[in-house]
Image (cartoon, helix red, strand yellow):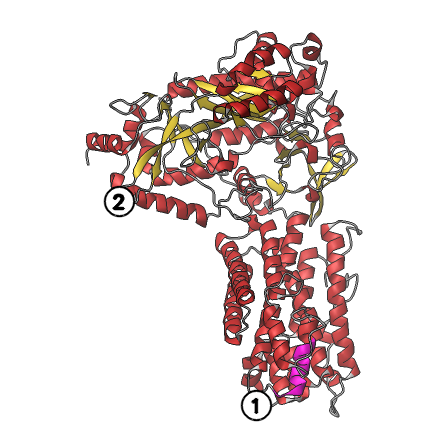
Amino acid sequence: MSDASLDRMAELLAAPAAAGHFDELRGKVGAGEGLAPHWQQFFARLGPGGFHDLQRRMASLRRQLHDNGVTYNVYADTDAGLQRPWALDLFPLVLPPAAWQQIETGVLQRVRVLDRVLADVYGPQKLLASGLLPAALVHGHPGYLREMHGTVPVGGTFLHIAAFDLARGPDGHWWVVSQRTQAPSGLGYLLENRLAISRQFPEAFEALQVQRLAATYGALVEGLKKMSPAGPDALIALLTPGPYNETYFEHAYLARYLGLTLVEGSDLTVRDECVYLKTLQGLKRVHGLLKRLDDEFLDPLELRSDSTLGVSGLLQAVRAGNVLVANAPGSAFLESPALLGFLPALARHLLGEELALPALPTWWCGERTAMEYVLPQMADCVIKPTYAGSTYHEGFDAVLGDTLSQRGRDEWTGRILRRGEEHTLQSQLPLSQMPTWRQDPLSDLGRIAPSSVMLRVFAVTDGPGSWRVLPGGMARVAGPGAATGIASMQRGGSSADVWVLTPGAVDPTTLLQPKLSAAAVAQRRRMVTSRAAEGLFWLGRYTERAENTVRLARLALQSLNGDDQSSVPLLSWISAVSEDNGLVLPTVPAATQARRVFERALIDGLGRPERGSVGFNLRALRLAAAGVRERLSQEHWATIVRAEEEFLRRSAEFAAEDKYQTSDALRLLESASSHLAAITGGQTDRMTRDDGWRLLSVGRHIERLAFHAQALGMGFQTGAVLDGAGFEGVLALFDSTITFHAQYQQTRDVAALLDLLVTDRDNPRSLGWVAQTLRGRLAKLAGSRPGELSFAIPDPAEWSLADLCPVAYEGAMPASLDTLLRNCTEASFALSDAIGALYFTHSTNTRTSFGV
């Protein structure tokens, strides 16, 4: 299809923007012939298939986002759960050079003003004394931190990242709607957007000369290092609230892209007014933090005492100049919409300049004259809270004046008259509308639908008192059916990539590392934080627990319905082990007393939320994995999620239908077993053998050592090992049936059982192999030499089959075997506590070793 034909096809498929709205596709207000030149270029370079291929590309885009695990979580969205897919439109917002020049110039000017406002407010406060800035907007705002007054941040810059939300009006000019300075989000998502959309339209991306992003991100990291106490050698970390935060995906994504260590508050500690990162190798000095949590949670000692997200003593380290925090704590009051109305005068006073990028007319109702002027215009305004998010002031969501009835406007007028300072009114702007691709059930082609759009752009520091604007941004697009004045992700909207065109050469900068020398490569080791190590440790433990409980539940159901269901020793042993591991409650009659009651209780409890059930262990496995998701492959993570979702869904169906078909339960357990086998494969075959992986492995072997030792001990206590069916059941629980019969044929000799399940150091299910492997993992983890164990992990080299199984064995468990099994169990629990104290909480002597 020719370029002209593609252009004409775009016109036919695209409805015009709503009346009174700027049409991004046509570059004008109202319907008209012809597309804007940059959109003509875009559609002329759609590539093979043209418009007929857009449906496939949309499906490909959604699949790519799903496969990459891109999520955006909404706290109030209970139906979406933890994994709400990121919404991204197929078409980018394309900005020609002239439009971008206006934006870039205005944003750079505004960030300079805001930085100087912060320097004055936390310094001499001349702006407050002169009345250029109302004290109520500063001292009355919870985002103003009195603890930081008099503090000049290390490097001298307060604002390192600032985001500005812009809208294009009917006149074609861009207007500032709001600004974000506390912990602005989007820098990670827009990277994913760029990667995804440029892959869908590679020809258009190259032909239009889209400006690249890497140079600005690189300048940000270099600027932070330059201003930090350690200079170029600084350790910079990204501080996240954790995996339950709505934008956690981008925290992990951004940390990987920028080469920063992703940390939570629990990873850090303050010693002697310096911030340290808790790692497996000890405490490492942190010189800079790129924070992604709100200021009030930063330091429970001086701010919110109930915060579990921050670091005790962090503000004192900032005041001492020992750590750079980006942005400097205390910038949240700049986000008040009321401040926009005072910035023109502030710019004239501080810079001697008029603002090049205007904000929408904004009136703070804390000023009587402003309130009296704007109240009659409420129908043309947006009502916004002056102190959004404050617990000390009235909170409400922004309200569009044109959606209110006369009665509604009268009610709001009454509220504003009573508490004017808590309300800010801003002119309502008809948002420009960009083309978006919508599936059309009546057409194979789909259609181009106009949707309201807002643009978020970012200014980032590249050195002391210097900033640059990221050449692109994140567009927020209104969802289908949304009001034309709203473009919000929280209200069902989506995002769009932003292509800024350049008339010159495209910057080829990349964040890929330059060629490293052999010595430099040898010195590069991935740092394992204590939190990540703890997450991996528990990931290993819950993986093993889930496997053990699934295998035990399958064995129990098969035994209760098989040829050996009359074996009292087998049923006694199964009852005891099931109760000990939480598969059935202690109040449930043993299988020897009421076999069907026991069976029903076991099936009903498979998915219950109580500790010990299969469902509980799978959920705990997924939660542990979520905390270290950045270290897992996408396939590994997807398998963990599917294992939990499928098991809990099917278990809920059993409960809803009040039925307990054993065959259905067995199929469910078999499916869970297959998922767990894939998860185990991902852990053992696809993860780097660093100290984090060693702790994952140690966690698995601690669980295996304790579980098998206790189960084998119960096998002797109940006499199951002396019964044919019980003997086979013990082998099955140890997953060693085939190995045993291949080696010993049809014998059921106890000595042979103990040889394979206890002393054999080649069987990965034997206690000897587990203890030997555990000692080896600990030795490699601690880097210690023989003889440095702080407590004894039983050494299988010292075990003797003759001592464990005397020739005159007559049924009672030999004392030596009983002692060994107890030692294995106790050592596993003691090791778990000691590892937590040494590596996770750093509460023991750091020179303690667990090597062999």
Secondary structure category for the residue under label 1? loop
Q: Mark 1 points at which residue?
A: 746
The answer to which of 591 and 415 lies nearer the viewer is 415
Badge 2 or badge 1: first in the primary sequence: 2
Q: Residue at x 55, y 87 (%)?
A: 563
Q: Which residue is drawn at 46% across and 34% down?
A: 510
Location of the N terminus (image quadrant): top left
The answer to which of 666 and 679 lies nearer the viewer is 666
Residue 751 picture location, percent across and down: 67, 86
Classify 827 as above or below 202.
below
Residue 273 visible in this rendered orientation of the protein: yes
Classify 99 as above or below 534.
above
Q: Main secondary structure of the magenta part?
A: helix
Task: Using the rendered view, name the quadrant where residue 328 is placed.
Answer: top right
- Which region is colored magenta? 566-576
Q: Which amino acid does label 2 sit on?
A: Asp
Q: Do the residues labelled 2 and 1 touch (CB within 8 Å)?
A: no
Q: What residue type is labelled 1?
A: Gln
Q: Mark 2 points at which residue?
A: 444
